[in-house]
Image (tube, helix red, strand yellow):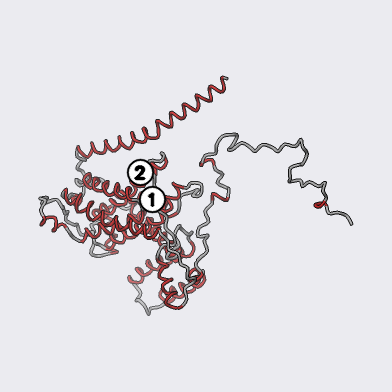
Amino acid sequence: MSTPIHEDPGYASPTSPSEDPGYQSPEPPPPGIDGQPVRWFDANRNEPYTRIVPFSETQDSSVEWFFTPTTLTALAVAMGVLAYIGMSRDVLDEGEDKRRLGVWAALSGFLLFSMIQFRDGPFVRPHPAFWRVVLGVNLIYELAMVFLLFQDLGTARHMMTLLDPNLGVPLPEKSYAEDCTFTFANVWNAVDIFCLAHALGWFGKALILRDYWFCWILSIAFEFAEYSLQHQLANFAECWWDHWILDVLVCNWLGLWLGMKTCEYLEVKPFVWRGKPRGVRARTRRVLKQFAPHDFTSFQWEGTADFAHYTAVFFLLAVFLAAELNPFYLKSLLWMEPEHPFVIARLAGVFLCALPAVRELYLYVSDPRKAIRMGQHAWLLLATVGTELLVIFKWGRGLYPEPFPLPVKWGFALLAATITIYPTIKFGIPATRRYLRRHGRERKLKQS
């Protein structure tokens, strides 16, 4: 019987090194491309390790039914409701109410499509479909702002009365700097519902940015922005103690502290050793936990690590300031009270949109090997804030004729000089020195 080839003592696998004494294993190839190190922007974007597969983790089997696709069922139910309301007289009489209901039905149909067919974002709790709806709402708002961009201010104010007949009435300008004497009575009289709004707003910003120093810089920068723009909007005029004591040190700090403590709590994920929940009560508790984050990533923005991080942090700070200031101008131009449902809905909507958007932007900045493009939430939110700015600039032409005060101009000049000189000293000069040293060594090697 013949001996199998792989048992023959003289056989050598073609993938194994030869046992010849004179055999030398080949040297490993030099690292990088042609001996040069590979930088992050040289990576091949077609490689599978550069692609993101969203929500690749296995869902909890205890609520597996919660993630079962029901696209056809949703379509059937939606068509049934649409047919009943649109083709019958049992719900509303024909006429204007039907037309208004048709607009809401069209928006609901678009949100249903976005819930089922849009791409998943970075969050899985309470459900990926919820964040798809948030993206759909953001897209509707962005399209509405694009439409308003092509309207004049008078037409836009008239259109707002179609949504709320109580609008369209000019509002008196209100200043908060009438009596700035630092007394207990004046401070106590300044405490109102907006203090709670300040605290809740900074609680939300802490959940979005997840970084103490970033939030503190944004808080102080917003107060300086109010100083700079109070000649345009009277409600930006506040007493010094209202700016720095009530706003920064009390309301903003309280909301920021609670928000960061919440981030620290969510970052520590507890272990469950008891296995899958059993019984109705345990399963109910598990379903309620669905509204908590699946996991939580602490952000380390590292704005001084390199020029790319510095640029990203400064850009994000500017976008946040614009998103904070835009509603003040929009409600002033469209004659809406601060507590109007449209204003509150805009603030709540931007908060929900910013949660996944900043998470996508952080991944795009901190790990470019994985995030080969900016996420959809971040891209759309940037477009929304930019469109709001265009609308404000267009409608505001001629309404704010008073020029910037001289101290404000000097402040802007100082800011421009600081944000230019600092990266030049921190990143530009060291990079130039490294470049000159490297090319000096290469020149000497060529000459030798």
Cα–Cα span, label 2 and label 1: 14 Å
Question: Pointer 1: what residue?
Answer: 382
Q: Of 39 and 169, which appears nearest the observer?
A: 39
Badge 2 crowding class, 10 Å Cα cut-off, few under 14, some 14 to 19, many 20 or more, is: few
**Residue furthest toward the bottom?**
90
Relative to 50, is 23 on the left or the right? Answer: right
**Residue furthest toward the right?**
1
The answer to whether residue 110 shows anywhere in this view is: no
Residue occupying image coordinates x 22% and y 46%? 229
Q: Nearer the viewer, mark 2 or mark 1?
A: 2
Q: Secondary structure at mark 2?
A: helix
Q: Secondary structure at mark 1?
A: helix
Q: Could you say where residue 234 lies in the image, as x and y percent from the top left?
A: 18, 50
Q: Could you say where residue 212 lies in the image, as x and y percent from the top left?
A: 32, 50
The answer to whether residue 8 shows anywhere in this view is: yes
Residue 314's label in the rendered image is 2
The relative height of residue 369 versus residue 294 in the rendered view (above or below) is above
Going by the numbered disc 1, the residue's amino acid type is Leu
Going by the numbered disc 2, the residue's amino acid type is Phe
Residue occupying image coordinates x 42% and y 55%? 297
Can you tell which quarter of the image residue 14 is in?
A: top right
* Quadrant, the C terminus: top right
Q: Of 433 and 390, which appears nearest the observer?
A: 433
